Amino acid sequence: MIASNVLDLVGDTPLVRLNKIPKTENVECEILAKCEFLNPGGSVKDRIGKRMVEEGERSGLYRPGDILIEPTSGNTGIGIAMTAAVKGYGCKITMPDKMSQEKSNILRGLGAEVIRTPRDAPMNDPRSHFQRAFQLKKELGERSHIPNQYSNPYNPIAHYDTTGPEILEACAHGEPDGKPRLDMIVVGAGTGGTVSGIGRFLKEKIPSCKIVAVEPKGSRLGDASLGVDDYDGPYEVEGIGYEFVPTVLDRKIVDHWVRVGDHDTFKMARRLMNEEGLLAGGSSGSVVWAAIQAIRHYKLGKGHRVVVILPDSARNYTSKFLSDDWLHASGFNSEPEANEFIEPLTRISVGKFLMSGKMYATTYLDSSVTIPRALALTGEDLALVTQDEKVVGVFSSKMALEKLLKGDCQPEDSIIKVADTQFRTVERTDGVDKIAHFLTIRPYVVVKSDNNDANNYLITSREVLRFALQFTKKDVPVSSSGEVSGDSP
């Protein structure tokens, strides 16, 4: 086969049988994985990126040379940027800073401009990736367009027209009567276009087929069926889940919802790689874990068949769930397989570390302080940001500069606009090795006060380095309780 361009290669992804995981989980029904990570852009979203642009062209609205703008968690942006590169469009992508650096690098490689936005900004916040996209459209005028996967009808239609029929055809292959055999399909829900389009098609062809939608704990998509989740914190998995219900999500199509926590998600994603050899992304772990729960819920066994959609590639997340250090620092893996530190360090508590005399003074700034004033007070060092006497963020000149250059703040804004509100924390009872693992992927960590008073500490690698240097001295004894004796280095 010789393709006229890379867009001809979107779709027609294979179904692959899972073998080891079902056996380990005592699941007797057949589980087939639709490997959407084998699309040329690395995800299921290549289908809608291509289709939405093509439909814009058919309508006469889009013309080569125009600028395409899309708010995205990354994969739809890649699909649109790939299409834009082939067809001759400019491309601007707005994406929360939660999303992996790998996605941002791929987008830039495809020629897109990437605008990162705060991960904690809700949809109606001017700083959110949604609002930034519409601000850009207003600034750039009529030759710019937002395909808008959240409301574009060709998002689910792309899956109704292609993904659904591919699954049906594959599930009929080899059947004696030539009829497709499928009892359940399990799909992650973000915008909801994938589960709505595939679900609608399959319900027309196989009415008995159960449609299962998957979201992370903390998402609100399944509230109508599951009730409000008792967990309202952030989730690290990318590409699924929202705090609002997108227009393209047809919840009536869904028979059953499953919520999955990050720990189960990433553990299963790693198992897909090392047990099945499938280089699938984090949300694929969500889908397979949910599929096992749904199989048990519906009591499916020998002779039943389930299809799971694996939406994107592990290559998007080499610095995240594929990293043992990231898993450990994010609290998903208590025993990292890589970067094991010198043994005495693992036996010393953070509390004893704070008493070692290796600490620099921690600066506190009220959240109302302006950026210029903060620079003057800190000498460009880090500082803890407080509001109502509680630590709510970390101020760094590097982050302030990045946000200023991106237009996310003004010079006289208060530091709360540029503060890192997603900082990592440790307890005084934790081991110093936990701080060290955090610092392999982050510039600082905050030691929480027992009483939320002024006794918080901002720790960087320099403090830990000064502390760890003494362990290279052969004459420094460390007791079994973690006590350190000897002079400071």
Image (cartoon, helix red, strand yellow):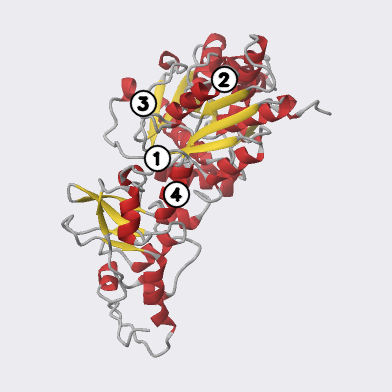
Q: Which residue is mark 1?
A: 409
Disc marking residue 131: none
Q: Alpha-carbon neighbours of circle 1 within 10 Å: few (<14), some, or many (≥20)? A: some
Foreground mark, 2 or 4, reads 4
Q: Are marks 2 and 4 in contact (CB under 8 Å)?
A: no
Outermost residue, bottom side: 475
Are the residues tagged 3 and 4 within 8 Å (C-beta)? no
In this orientation, which residue lies closer to the viewer: 56 or 63?
A: 63
Q: Are marks 3 and 2 in contact (CB under 8 Å)?
A: no
Tell me the mark number nearer the camera, choosing from 3 and 4: 4
Question: Label 2: how many residues lie within 10 Å, few (<14), some (14-19) or many (20+)?
Answer: many
Q: Is disc 4 surrounded by few (<14), some (14 to 19) or many (20+) residues within 10 Å?
A: some
On the rendered structure, is 336 left or right of 311?
A: left
Which residue is the site of mark 4?
401
User: Which residue is found at the position 39% from the left and 25% from the top?
Assistant: 257
Q: Which residue is mark 3?
A: 124
| Amino acid type, callout 3 | Asn
- Per the model, the C-alpha gap separating discs 2 and 1 is 25 Å
Residue type, label 2: His
Q: Earlier in the sequence, mark 4 or mark 1?
A: 4
Which residue position is annotated with label 2?
145
Query: Mark 4 falls on what kind of element?
Result: helix
| Amino acid type of the residue tagged 4 in the rendering | Leu
At x 65%, y 36%, the residue is: 111
Q: Position of residue 382 (x, y in %)?
A: 35, 59
What residue is shown at x 63% (from left), y 9% (from top)?
A: 59
Towards the viewer: 299 or 187: 187
Q: How many marks?
A: 4
The mark nearer the N terminus, 3 or 4, is 3
Earlier in the chain: of badge 3 and badge 2, it is 3
Front-lying residue, 112 or 437:
112
